[in-house]
Structures are given as structure tokens and as C-alpha cells.
Amino acid sequence: MDQSPAILLDRLGRDYGNFTAVDDLNLRVQPGEIFAFLGANGAGKTTTIKMMVGLLPPTRGLVVIGGHDVWKEPRQAKRAIGYVPDTPILHELLTAREFLWFMADLYNLPRPEGQARAAELLEMLGLKDASDRLIRDFSLGMKRKMAIATALLHRPRVLLLDEVTNGLDARAAREVKDLVTRWAGEGVAVLLTTHILHTAEELSHRIGLIHKGRLLCVGTKEELAERAGKPGANLEEIFLTLTGDQVPAEMEGVEGRVGPFPSVTPGRRKRFEPDETR
Amino acid sequence: MSELLPTAWSIAKSGWRSSWNRSIRFSKMKTAAIFLAAQMLFFVFIARRAPAVAGAGARESLGGLLAVMAVQMAWFGMMYGFVRGQMQLYQGILVPLFQITPARPLAFLIGRVIEAVPARAWSTLLWAWAYSGVIPGPARWGALPLLAGFGLAIAMIAHLAGLLLLSFWSRWSPKTMRNGTLLFGIVTLGIVTAAMIYLTGGGTFTELALMMRRYRLLAYGAVLALTGLPGLLLLAALLVRPAAVEGLYRQGVYQVIELNEADVDRRVRSRWLPVRQHVMRAVLSREWLELARSKVARIQLLIWLAGTVGVWFAGRAMAGRPTERLIQNVGLLALLTWFMAYGHWVVRVFEKERRTMLLYRLAAIPAGRLIAAKFTSIFLPSALLVAGTALVGALAAGALLSDTLRLLGWTLGALAAGTLGGFGAAAATAGESEDQELDAAPRREGDTAQTTGNNAWWALARTATLLVTAGLPIWLGAGQPGTPFRLPEAPLLAAAAALPAAILAGGYWIMEKGWTANGH
């Protein structure tokens, strides 16, 4: 049961001058787990993810991905990470196919494998017909799909998805959600942020709420509902209660604590059972 | 090592592919072909003067030519790495991709050097062709590949040394590294001013060229020693402790990013100007607040100050000279100083707006009112800066009040003409950059590359329009220098006034038509 976490954040913090964007954040996500990282605008979600992928150096604390410290062993850690940013990072003067080949080289995939994988992903994400068009001419949804393809190219063990369904139509969003569930089933740890609470509720095994840079609480929806003092409430009610200015008395002292793991999530969501053989 | 060179090669290929896509594959204008043709013409011109450029020492032997080639290519390579390095290493899409992938920093640096090879090889070949002309007979064709290959190798090593030095600098003092281009701006202004002082002091272009040649080796040697040696030391260190040298770049990137995040803007209190006309009020308040908050504008102020110091010396050299000479030197330098520091205010006036142009269109602001407000917001501070510089020059020259007023009249007149002309060109091309922002929907293949290719030409057209329309009045005020006889002044003056007015009217018409056609 006690396997090493795919994602480990230890007392992670980030300051901008006198302003603390992320404060003392502790978190563990296991292989195969889907973790929803929720918070209001400016709560610190994207800052946290940027520190996890190597875009932003933390002021203090530790980020360990796949057993490697992102800031001390960056190359090893980054091989394990697939990242879909809120604003896609794409070389827009390349065609879709050229960009994926280029990224395959940056991840040091053998050329035949990189090219085959690129073709497979373009097909899977419905971009095959646009393979030879400049990315700059793509719609927002197509660019988002390109970002997803890029993140999956090297078969990462950890996926960090920042607002991954933004800009996607209903069908594409459904497909992406199904893919997320499938990847988790294959042992990939997924940390996702979203403002669509229904998506978080539907996909995630556990939910973490970040508010003003601090991790308020972590747990299943039912556990969070209990902590909010609203058993049976939906995630929206829970979110509004816990991220409001009034924090329930029973929440005092649980800030930044990691909730029990693993947990049973009743209803239509499947139970998360970490596979110890992985 | 096994993954270092393939990754570097891939980084270089991505740069070539994007250039190919932008300027040939998806470009209807095939801008790269036009650029290459223009470069060839330039080098045909250089080649005709090759013996003079290579210098007397090189005429004697191939060794002398190789020495000239080595010094020159080392200088070009180093400067390329140094000046363009900021853009290559710290800006653009490759930087975040480097940050999120396991690519080695050294692969990134080498990739950037390889990426520059085609452009460098092309210019090295042209220089080699020019210099090999010194060797008579068929031996020239043997010397040509030797000179080209040797020059290219030196240039590549120097480029890498320049990038390493930049990485080292950004690691330990990112702030001074970021302001490095300011230094080049000031040095350039200093050289231009010195040349103008020399020429106006009775020197000829031939004497100036001879003097430059005399001090060339000394100047190159000093700069190469200053910048080249640390770069070479870093190259040597790379062979001994690659991880430590590579780490400099990785740490430097974060230092520069931290710095950019920390000081994008200065804190300035919001002030909304008490102007009655609402468009004027909105535009002036916004533009000037933006200016007050911009750190870049403050750095540009240093370039302007350095230019003004140069104008002081130019003014001193003009003491006791006719007013025309004062206008020719002080007036022209005052305008040049403004152009170097703030010319982009005019050239990029609508282009820099990008999405915010839509706000004016959504609010149904008439194009004429917007142009008038923008013109006021730019002309008033520009006039203050140019008048300040010109006054410094007049003071140094000990000019009489009447002469000073004449200098100010011609200089500010030229500024107004240049700004109006530049505005006309900017208004005419405003739709080009705006169209890129209008829709996120898929477009026909080639549309964007076409627009991108065009943008470079439009920027060149706007700059040329500004320079021509400002240059004509100052040339008239200076007594039409460079012409064998004096042309009648009245019609020329009318033309100097009518040209920017006509360009502005044309630009306004095109902008208004574009806005109306789009339903606004």
C-alpha cells in the first residue's frame, strides 16, 4: 500500500516581493490517481503547476516528480512529466507534424518512434487533416489539442493539466475526459485544474482546494462536504463554502494537511485502488 | 554526448523550418528570395572595394588575408552572439520549451549556433569571394573555399563564445546584461556623432575611411580581448566541467525571467487628464500613463541623453558657423537622437496596439479622431525632447537668439513633417497587424505567413516614410547640401509640407475605408 508518490510537494512556496502566491503547500499524488486541484482565480493553481514543471523556481520547498527533484535533477524529472498549460506553448511557425517531431527530438525519442507517435496522436486527437498546416492558423480548440498531443508524446508517468478542456467543444471535451480516465487506468498520475466543477467531480479520485495560496483541504468530495458542514452537497456548494471568507470552525488547523489516502468514492466514480505492482 | 548533437541539430532545424515556412513555403511574396537578392547586391558593391577593405598587409599573401578574415569573422561571430544572443537565449517560444523538456542547456546553445550557420556561411562566402579577389589568377579559386571555411569555423566558435559569455553575465548580473543593448545604442550614437564632428570640422569621407582603417586592428583587438578572452575561457571550461558551464545558462534563464517578472512596470498613480474631448482625453491619459509606467521608456531616455551629450559636442564644433551648418548638424543629430530612442512611437503607433485597436473600433471612434489623439500624444513629448536637444546644441555653439529660433523652427518643422508622414504610413498599414488578431478560426493555408512577411515590409515602409518626410525639411533648412546648385526654395518647401499631408490623408482614407468596410 505504501508506494512512492508520483507527485510530492513538500512545503512548497513562492513569493513575489512581499506577496506570497503559494504558501507552505504539501501534497502527494499516487500513480494512477486523478487529483483535481481547485481554487478561485489567482488562488495559486497555475503558479504551483509552473513550479512543478520547471517554468518557475520556487522560493522554498521541494517538488519531486517520479522520484526526482524537479529543481535538482531536472532532466530526469522532466522525462516523467507531460504538461498541458492553460495557454498552449507551441512553435506556431511550424506545422503540426513538424512541431511534434521537434518535441520528440527534445524528449530524445528515437526518430521512427517519434514520428509514429506523432502520427498516432494527430489521428487520435482529430488533427490528421491539419498535420501539414501552420499551427498559427489553428483555432483555439485545435491549439489545445496540439498541446495535449505534445504532453502525451513521450508517454509521461505524470500529467499536469491546466484548464485542459478550455476552448474545446462538447465532443472534444468528452473525448479528453475519457482519455484522462484511461491514462489513469494505465497508471499515470493526473493532476488537473479546472473551473468546471462538474468535470472535477466526475473525474477525480481526490480534490484539493487552494485558497489565497494555501491548500485548505484535501479529500474526496464526501470528505470535503463533511468538512464544509454540508453533507450531501454538490461540489459547487462545497467550493463556495470552503473558499468563502468564513472558514468553518472545524476547518481550523487542517490547512495544508494531506487528506487520507486512498479513499473510497461512492456513486458513479470508480474506486481508486493503487496498483502496488506498478 | 549521444543525445547532445541530435537535440542541437533538431533545435537548429526547427529554426530553419520556421524561416522556410514563413518566408518561402507559406509566403506568396517569397520574402527570403528578395532578402537574399538584396544581400547579393550589397556584396557585389563590397567586392568591388575588397582590396581597400582587406588592407595593405593582406595584399602580400594568403596568410595576411586569413588573418583579416579571422579577426573580422571572430568579431562578427562574437557580436552576433552577444547582440542577438539576448533574443536567442531569453526570448521566444524555445525558452519555455527548453524549460519544460529534458533538453540539455548545451544542446540549446549549440543549436542556436548551428541555426545561424546558413546566414553566417552565406555572408562568409561573400566576404571570402571579395577578399579572394586580392589574389591574382586562378589561385583565387583555391583561396576562396579556404577563406570561407576558415572564416565560418572562426565565426561559429566566436558565436558560441559570445553566447557563453552572455550566459555567464546573465547568471551573475542579469540586470546589466539586459541593458547591454543600451550600451551598443550609446556607442553607435557616439560613433555617428564623432564622424559628424570630424566631417563638419573639414574632414573628408576618404580621410575618415583611412583613419578608421588605421585604427581598425587596434579597436578590434581591444574589443576582442575584452569580450573574446572570457568567452574562450568559458569554452575551455566547457571541455573540463561541462555541467558547471551549462548550469550557468539554466540559472541565467531563471534570473532573467525573475527580473522580467519583478520589474515590468513602475508604480505610478492613476491620473486622468482634464481634457474636454473624450477621445483625446482617453488616448492622452492612457498613452502618457503607459509611458510613465514603462521601464523601457526610461532606458530609452538614457539613449536620448547620450545623444544629447553628442549634440553638445557637435554644437561646439559649429561655433561661429552659418546657421545652415547648425541646422545640418545640430538639427539633424537632434532628430536622429529622437529617432534612435523614440522613433518607434511613430513607426509602431498602431501596430503596437494589436487587440486594443478593437476597443476603438467597438466604441465606434472615428478614425480621424483617433489619429488626431494619437498624433497629439506622440508629438508633444517628442517636440519637447527634440527641442531640448537642439537647444543644447545651440547653447554649445553660442548661437544668437535669432539663429536658435531658426534652428528650432526647422527642426520642429521636420519633426512634425516626419511624424505626420509616419502616421500616414502607420494608418495605411494599421489593418495589417489588426487582421491577425481578429479571428482565431482556421484560415486558408498561407494567410498568416503572408501577413507576417508583409509586416516586415510595412515596418520598413513606415520607417522610410518617416525618415524621408523628416529629412526633406531639414535638408532644405540646411541649404540643400550635396547639390551642385541651389534649387528654388518655395516649391520645395511646398513639396516638403504637402508630401506628409498627402501621405497622412491617404493613410486616413485607407484606415477609415477599412473600418467602414468591416461594419464599424
Image (cartoon, grey):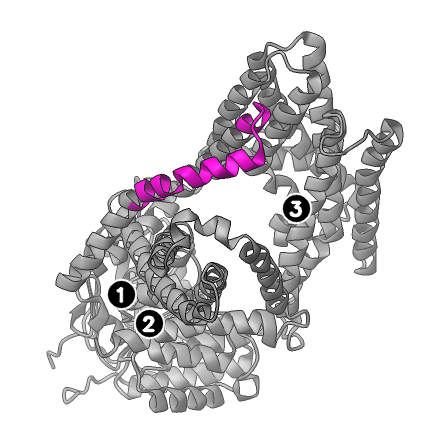
SS assignment for the magenta stretch, majority? helix
| Upstream in sequence: badge 2 or badge 1 | 2
**As drawn, B23 above or below B222:** below
Residue A254 visible to the viewer: no
Kind of residue at disc 2: Ala
Which label was assigned to residue B463?
Answer: 3
Dot 1: chain letter:
B
Dot 2: chain letter:
B
Which label was assigned to residue B8?
Answer: 2
Residue at image coords 29%, 56%: B161
User: Considering depth in this image, is B495 or A88 the residue closer to the camera?
Assistant: B495
Residue at image coords 63%, 31%: B335
Disc 3, SS: helix
Q: Residues within 10 Å of mark 2 (few under 14, many from 20)?
A: many
Q: Are marks 2 and 1 in contact (CB under 8 Å)?
A: yes
Residue at image coords 64%, 65%: B34
Residue underneath mark 1: B106
Q: Which residues are magenta?
A: B197-224
Percent from the top left, x then y, of residue A259? 21, 67
In the image: residue B57, left or right of residue B103 = right
Q: Residues within 10 Å of mark 3 (few under 14, many from 20)?
A: many
Location of the N terminus of chain B (image quadrant): bottom left
Kind of residue at disc 1: Leu
Residue at image coords 61%, 40%: B345
| Upstream in sequence: badge 2 or badge 3 | 2
In the image: residue A28, left or right of residue B256 = left
**As drawn, A257 above or below A34:** above
